[in-house]
Image: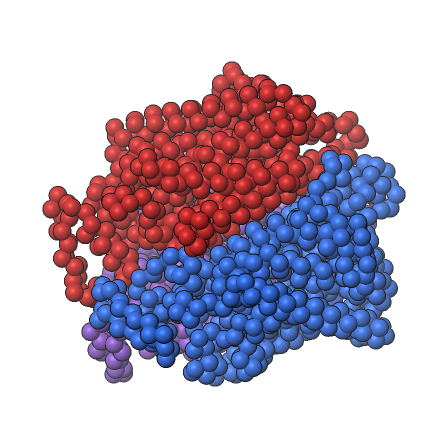
Chain colours: A red, B purple, C blue
Amino acid sequence: MSNQTDSREEALTSNSTGQDGGSTNVQEILSWDDATWILTSAFIIFTMQTGFGLLESGCVSLKNEVNIMMKNVIDIVFGGITYWLFGYGLTYGELYTNPFFAIGYFAVDADIDEMGPVFSKFLFQLSFATTATTIVSGAMAERCNFRAYCLFSLCNTIVYCVPAGWIWGSHGFLHKLGAIDIGGSGAVHLVGGSSAFVAAWMLGPRLGRYDHGREPLPMGSPTNALLGLFMLWWGWLAFSSGSVFGVSGHKWKFSARAAVTTINASFGGGVVGLIYSYIRKKGKFDILDLISAVLGSLVSVTGGCAIYRPWEAIVIGAIGGGLACFGIPFFDWLHIDDPVGATSVHGLSAFWGVLAIGLFADGETLLNLTNGRSGLFKGGDAYLLGVQALAAVSFSLWAGFITFLLLWIINKFIPIRMEAHEELLGADLVEHGIRRSGVGVSRALSALGSHPNFDIEAGSAIGTNPVHLKILK
Amino acid sequence: MSNQTDSREEALTSNSTGQDGGSTNVQEILSWDDATWILTSAFIIFTMQTGFGLLESGCVSLKNEVNIMMKNVIDIVFGGITYWLFGYGLTYGELYTNPFFAIGYFAVDADIDEMGPVFSKFLFQLSFATTATTIVSGAMAERCNFRAYCLFSLCNTIVYCVPAGWIWGSHGFLHKLGAIDIGGSGAVHLVGGSSAFVAAWMLGPRLGRYDHGREPLPMGSPTNALLGLFMLWWGWLAFSSGSVFGVSGHKWKFSARAAVTTINASFGGGVVGLIYSYIRKKGKFDILDLISAVLGSLVSVTGGCAIYRPWEAIVIGAIGGGLACFGIPFFDWLHIDDPVGATSVHGLSAFWGVLAIGLFADGETLLNLTNGRSGLFKGGDAYLLGVQALAAVSFSLWAGFITFLLLWIINKFIPIRMEAHEELLGADLVEHGIRRSGVGVSRALSALGSHPNFDIEAGSAIGTNPVHLKILK
Amino acid sequence: MSNQTDSREEALTSNSTGQDGGSTNVQEILSWDDATWILTSAFIIFTMQTGFGLLESGCVSLKNEVNIMMKNVIDIVFGGITYWLFGYGLTYGELYTNPFFAIGYFAVDADIDEMGPVFSKFLFQLSFATTATTIVSGAMAERCNFRAYCLFSLCNTIVYCVPAGWIWGSHGFLHKLGAIDIGGSGAVHLVGGSSAFVAAWMLGPRLGRYDHGREPLPMGSPTNALLGLFMLWWGWLAFSSGSVFGVSGHKWKFSARAAVTTINASFGGGVVGLIYSYIRKKGKFDILDLISAVLGSLVSVTGGCAIYRPWEAIVIGAIGGGLACFGIPFFDWLHIDDPVGATSVHGLSAFWGVLAIGLFADGETLLNLTNGRSGLFKGGDAYLLGVQALAAVSFSLWAGFITFLLLWIINKFIPIRMEAHEELLGADLVEHGIRRSGVGVSRALSALGSHPNFDIEAGSAIGTNPVHLKILK
């Protein structure tokens, strides 16, 4: 990774002197060809936010469908403004650095002769940062106070930006040790998944979640969830492929490989998801199983997307998808209630994805993405696997600990858990004043009915007569 | 703007002799690199139509959800064919020009050696034109006769194309005066918003709209509206960034800056929208407030996207978002019923956006986007602010007046307002024969019930018994 | 087509020696510029899967909405893995070839110095292959057994890849005869549409489909269907434009032309669809008519997108759209029940599209896309029309016959038709365990009620009382 990042910085901080010392004209061309690739990739990566919104709102109950979309909007607005203010500098700053964090680039700006590389890189990294902060929103769905979430979203940038600097900043200790994470299996997904785990644990399960067993609650809109899967899937191609950060020189070859391994991994994950679901559900196919398997496979391949062979990507994706599938009942068995399975999909699969680099990485000399090292299965020694394991553990511990700290502090000011009656009525009504007729109300009522602290006298015809609701708490 | 447009035309009408007089090979490369950028941007800009469709159908009541989507399809089909036939020529024609309009390029075509630049430019401008014509459909929602709308959509091209020529055509008087509008705050959004204002005023409010106060009616599908916001948001990056119209030479640096200022503006708008909503709704967060604020901020920044600094974009976006928020109750106070807030979001915010260029524009010499002038806050004199104000007033008056004229004439042939009973039943049923069970019908019924000319005997159990409806008119 | 494919292969198999023998630097630039175009196009083409999913799930009844989306996921997972394993090699393999098929490239992989062109081409072709296999899923909707469909999806790759080799492989007999199909009117859509016809015929109509006449059944979600139309529409621009397979040299000019003719064709189709619907529905506008007309026009133009003039594209699209519209009642008159109209839209319109090349093709010498031949209306003789007709007939017969064979064999192992009671309850419930309240159940019940083998005692208030369902079969 170190040389890739070096060449990233070369390409982006010096556009007048190119990397092969060619003529000025060609250098300029290199720069704008790479910028076209980087900016276009970023535009496509942002569409993954639509995918996350659809997936999460499709997975939760109808009474929280809009609220979770609003949280995604908040993630972009607050996550974006803080990333611009200090987040980018925590990862790539040069004012002060030590192996664990950097400072600089506050309120990112650039003069006219530097703005090309600086703004291209900032926009691309911003699209990564907003993705990382969005992952955790799903795990907190249906029971997290909206204002507390807003505060968390403001602070969440720090959770992502510091470990991103470890691996992608030239100052970072993992970078210096030679750890590799091209598309962010570790810095984006493992960090997001670990945050999700801690947040879901701290919030506790939704009211009545495990009253009738551990099977996932019905999805509010499986169609929307599948649409979200699709949008994430195609966006992921740009996410992985754009992570090579250019097309000039030999970069385009690795960009092309990254796209192929990414889609191939999803084939492996999809097959495993279908088999898993077929066995578990005795011949039926569960929507969430398949979604989790495909996303888990994409999470696991993205870290080493440019340095795998296509068949290896299928194997890595199959294992990643399998971990995502098995993780969901495992965390439910622990009564960690993660409504969209973010802990499994982004946590477990990402952990595997970071390790897989230590096993399958192709050493190559064109971009020197691996610093000359190879994975254990490719004739390398255990060093790379070792630093990848260190990276995985570091990411998990950091994200878990800081998330705990942030939520613990926020909880002192604004309780992170919604009031029980608010949770039962749903955040769409309580936080945004959205009334639904028919379906949604009847679900909310049946939820209320199943809770011992509430007594309901529903009108005889739902939707026509008013609903009488006594809160006995 | 004048030099930018000049360089646009240079780059696009002569691909054999480049702009710096370099070798033929490099010139060719310049051309196709720019074409890649322009075409890819256009592909992404078209996805904003999906966003508009989702936003508008999400904002209206369920009984008109499909109809408004159909109007968006009409906008593309009729708006597109008329743009091809004469619209493009009204903006960029060279057969006859005066400072106020141009003629030429009827039924756009090009020979094989000219087709590269001509078709690239046409497709890009077409994506702008269809956006401009779509803006007004939201303001006319839920009560405009579908056939009258089709006629309006056929003529609407003229509303956009003439002022686009003022600012972007080499013949235009605003262009010659040095007015600037890089991404179309004025020519696209202010024109669309002014049309929206006049159309909403001429149609009058929906039946019963202000019977129970001025608070917006419930959205049919807040989830879809938020999805629409997302799709517009990401598409806007290509809209602004693609407006620099290339990546070759120094253009890529401004393309990158345009993308960053665009997303930064939305952060400013989003924060203002959250604060506004929190205060207005006493601690709740309104969906439409946040949507309007983010879109308003994007509208206001796009005109000068490539010539602002990132922090200025946040300020400009915050003001633009605030104007969009305050505009909605203001127009409702005037009983101008604009169901999706297009008048505020595209009108008020755009007016500010056109003026903001006169305040914040960075003078630069690389692309000479400002003809050497700077904004009032950047050491320039009041000249630029003056011509920007002239542009804003010209755009508003033209669009308002021509829209009035068109709708007034159309109304002589086909009444633009739906029949009252059709409006109450909803355009989905009346125009497209779509029957909805449950929710939609009950809403249509309650709307009927609130209207003095109608009497309803609804069956005791909605959805199972037939609904008896007597129209007493 | 032959020379285009040749230049495709040149550009993509030799990146060190370019096509004009220029300097090494420029050759490298050519390669990565083309790769940027090809990869970005592929990323956008994949979003058409989201479009297909939305369109198909919007067209079917709510009780099958999720199931059809799941089939789209299966198409990508199984269609993708088989395309990687053997499909790509059936089209482009070089191990063994004869004019009717090729073998090679099993489990596509490439060494580091070849991977750029191989992986770029594979990803692009994969995006085509998954599109082709998805087309047929709509025609089989609402009554095809899910496990049988999975098997079919695994084998479907062979249906597409063999004829794709006829026209695009250097070994193919149609390629050698000089047949042209730039964007896949024939190899993608006519093949898909012919498969759809046979599959719909073999499955038979849905239960009760023609009990009350031949008018299409109500769409489950017209809004989603229109959203799907939008996503397909914009994706199609990249589909056609990307098919020129590069931007270097003169290619960018044809890429630009392909985008313009594609969007122009849709204007022609849209106008025809509106007129058709207005007449047929006596002043109303039918959603499915307009969707079919627009998609039919896109299908018909894509085969010759780069070699038409813009006004010709409008004519070709108008005829293609008209055929799609008239085809739907025609196939319903034959009691071929195709719930989404895939047979008309992808079959009839594509047949016309393949022939239209023989009439309208511009001979040109820059890329020599037509081998120096011109269409009948452009001064050419009847040869080109003749080979295009041969191509159209060959595609139709192959796809029809192999689909018949595959489904006939699969039916021996797993009956392809769902059990009657499963079909009536809907695949969402039966295959995926999804329960819907309100609307969906009442529709399922009324469907059950209209079937002679079933007797229903519905509770007095749907949604509150349990539904008693006796299956008397």
In the rendered structure, the answer to whether residue A461 lies left or right of residue A223 reads left
Q: Residue at x 25, y 76 (%)?
A: B465
Question: B398 and B201: which one is in front?
Answer: B201
From the top left corner, tell me how far across and down residue C10 is, in percent: 82, 48
Residue beneath the point at 19% across and 52% down:
A449
Name the image quarter holding residue C344.
Answer: bottom right
Q: Residue at x 88, y 43 (%)?
A: C21
Q: Depth check: B3 or C382 in front? A: C382
The residue that appears at 49% across and 31% down in the rendered structure is A351
C69 relative position to A337: left or right: right
Q: Left or right of B263: which side holds B59? A: left
> Is the residue A408 above or below the residue C450 in the image?
above
Rendered image quadrant of residue C102: bottom right
- Residue toward you, C80 or C224: C80
Q: Residue A278: tell me if it is visible.
A: yes
Figure label count: 0
Name the spot of residue B213 as percent of width and height, x first.
Answer: 24, 60
Q: Is C306 left or right of A92, judged from the image as shown?
A: right
